[in-house]
Amino acid sequence: MRFELTLALRYLKGNRHTLGGTLTSVISVASVTVGVAALIATLAVMTGFREDIRKKILGTQPALIVLSQTGTMPEGDYSPVFSDVRDVRAWSPFILEQGLLKSGRRTQGAVVKGVDPDREPAVTGLSSRVKTGRWEALRSSTPTVLLGTELASTLGVGEGDHLLLVVPSLSAGLFGDLPVMRRFVVGGTVETGLYDYDSNLAVVSLASAQRAFDRRQAWTGIGVKVRDPDDPFDAAFRIQKNMGSSVYVRSWLAMNRNLFSALKLEKAVMFLILTLITLVAAFTILSNLILVTAQKTREIGILKAMGATDGMIQRTFLLKGILLGLFGTGAGTALGLAISWLLKAYPVVKLPADVYYVERLPVTVVPSDVMMVVGAALAIVLAATIYPARIAAKLDALTAIRQ
C-alpha cells in the first residue's frame, strides 16, 4: 500500500508540465470545501431556529398536560399519582378559558390562563418571561393579570392600569344570559417570543380564574414537567395508566406536531439541495482523475510493464480521489464550524427583532449533523472516484507505452 500512496501523492502534487491537473486538483478541493462548509453552516442555523422555537414553546407550556374527558378536573392533591412516575419532576394545575378584555374603547379577545404562582415556575418558564412588572404580582389579593406584550400594546395598557375581563353567558338575568365582568389590575407583561402567545395570552392567578369563570374547586387540567421533554412518551403512558380513562394526556410534541414536521422537512430538503454542491465537486474530481489518466497513460504502461498490477493502479487513483475528498472535507468542516461560530458570536447577520424576536441568527452545531455531512461528502467523492480508477487499471501496457 505504501507504493500506491507514494504514487497517489505524486500525482496529487503534479509538476510544472501538468498545470491542468494541478489546477483541477485545487478546484476539486475548493469545491468540496465550499459544499461542506455551506452544508454545516446552513444546518447549524436551521437547527438553531428549531432549538429557539423549542425553548420558547417549553418556556410557555408544559411538556405534558393532563386533561379531563369532561373538560373539568376536580381540585385536589395529585402528588401520589405523579410520585409513582419516575420521569415526572413537577406538576401544576391550570385553568384555560377564553374571554374579552376591555380597556377604555379597546376590546380584544384573549386566552386567559389561570396558574398557581408558586407551582407554575417549576413546570414552565413563564415566570422568567416577565418583561415588565413582577411575577409575584399574581400572589396579590387584588385580581392581577400579566398580559402578552402584543396584547398589552393592542389594548394600550401598561403596569398599574385597569381593565375588564368579560366572560360571556355565566349568569341569567331578566333578559336572558348576561356576561359577567371582572376588574383586573395589569401587573406587567410577558414576552414569550412567539407572536400567537404574545398577542393572545393573559395570565392570572388560579384563584382569580376560578372566581371569574365560576370554576369552584375545579381546574381545566394539570401541567407536568418531565426529565426529558424530547422523550415524554413513557411518562405520558404511565400517567395515563395511573389516572385511568377519565383523563387523557397530551405532549407538547403532539400539540406542535405540524410545526416541527415542517421544520424537519425543510431541513431535509435544504440538506439535499446543498448536497448538489458537493455533487458538482465530485464531478470535478472525476474529471481531474480522467485528465491525470490521459496525461499519465505512458507512465501507467511503464509501471505495468515493470510489474504493477491492475489492483495497484486502481488503488493509486482511488487514493488520489479519496485524498482530494479528505482535504476538501477537512477544510470544509473547519470553515463551516468557523462560520457557525462567527454567526453565533457576532451580529454578522442582524434580524428585525419585531419580526423574529431575536436580533441575531440562532446557531446550534449538532455533532451528528456534522458527521452526516462529512459522511455524505466522502461517500459522494468515493463514488466519483471508482469509474476513472477502473479506466486507469484497465489500460493495456503495450498500447499505453506506444502512446
Image (cartoon, grey):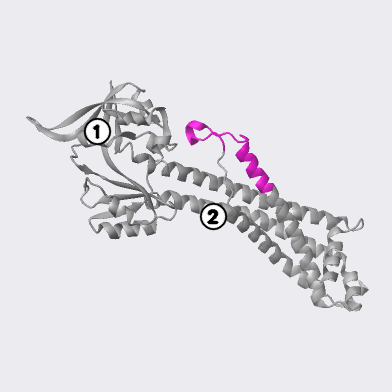
Residue type, label 1: Ser
> Label 2's element?
helix
Against 58, residue 175 (above or below) is above
Q: Which residue is mark 1?
A: 208
- Whether residue 354 appears in this view of the structure is yes
Where in the figure is residue 191, as x and y percent of width and height? Answer: 42, 33
Dot 2, crowdedness within 10 Å: few (<14), some or many (≥20)? few
Q: Residue at x 73, y 51 (%)?
A: 331
Among numbered discs 2 and 1, the one appearing first in the sequence: 1
- Whether residue 272 appears in this view of the structure is no
Where in the figure is residue 6, as x and y percent of width and height? Answer: 85, 66
Which quadrant does the N terminus fall into?
bottom right
Against 227, residue 375 (above or below) is below
Q: Which residue is mark 2?
A: 268
Where in the figure is residue 201, as x and y percent of width and height? Answer: 34, 35
Residue type, label 2: Ala
Viewer-closest of 320 and 143: 143
